Amino acid sequence: MASVTLPQKLSEKLREKAEEKDYLPEELVIEILFKSLDEEIDPEELVEQYRLLSDKYLKEGKEFLNKGDLVQASEKLWGASALAVKMVAAERGLKLDKHGGLWSFIDTLTKESGDKEFVRLFHVANGLHKNFYENEMPKEAVEVSAEDIERLIEKLRSFS
């Protein structure tokens, strides 16, 4: 995976646009690049991109947690979860664009597997997403939530 450094103003604009579309910034960059190159995103390549980004966000989330930056840890752990859900959906040829699409797909996985833990663990991920905006969770709660996020990602990967 390659990285690109953006000027601050452009980086902020990217984050704003990504939020508007309910995307993560890197996810939006990938889509923009493929469109501007007039290329179709290969479904297998999309699955791999989601997997790599999920791994990256999980690692970054743990690093922010270790540094005590609970707001950034929360957002990265949320991102890791959302991308893992999108990865499993992409394996089925589905593209989830909105928050509701993530919940709908989690509901589908729960019904297919009979495992209600998907809903419980994804609810934790949503709590972390909320914490990014409200910064109300204590460190211990974010630490426990991080364990749940790892469990969710493991379950999603074993389901795919």
Image (tube, rainbow, N blue to C red):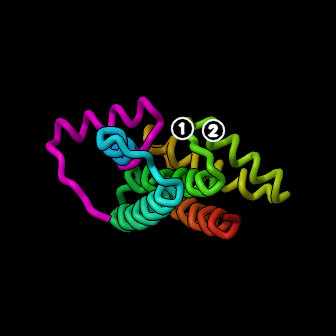
Q: Which residue is mark 2?
A: 101
| Magenta part, dominant SS | helix
Q: Residue at x 65, y 62 (%)?
A: 156
Report the span colored magenta: 1-27
Residue sitting at x 36%, y 61%: 64
Q: Residue 128 placed where, x, y %? A: 52, 49
Compared to residue 152, the image places residue 111 above or below, namely above
- Counting from the top left corner in percent of width and height, residue 160 is at 67, 64
Q: Quadrant of the N terminus?
A: bottom left
The residue wearing badge 1 is 97
Instruction: Give the residue displayed 45% in from the left and 66% down from the top.
Output: 55
Residue 52: x and y, percent? 44, 64
Element on which disc 2 rests = helix
Amino acid carrying label 2: it is: Gly
Residue kind at label 1, given as amino acid type: Asp
Q: Is residue 34 visible?
A: yes
- Whether 151 is among the magenta residues is no
Q: Between residues 27 and 114, which one lies in front from this camera angle?
A: 27
Q: CA distance from mark 2 to mark 1?
A: 7 Å
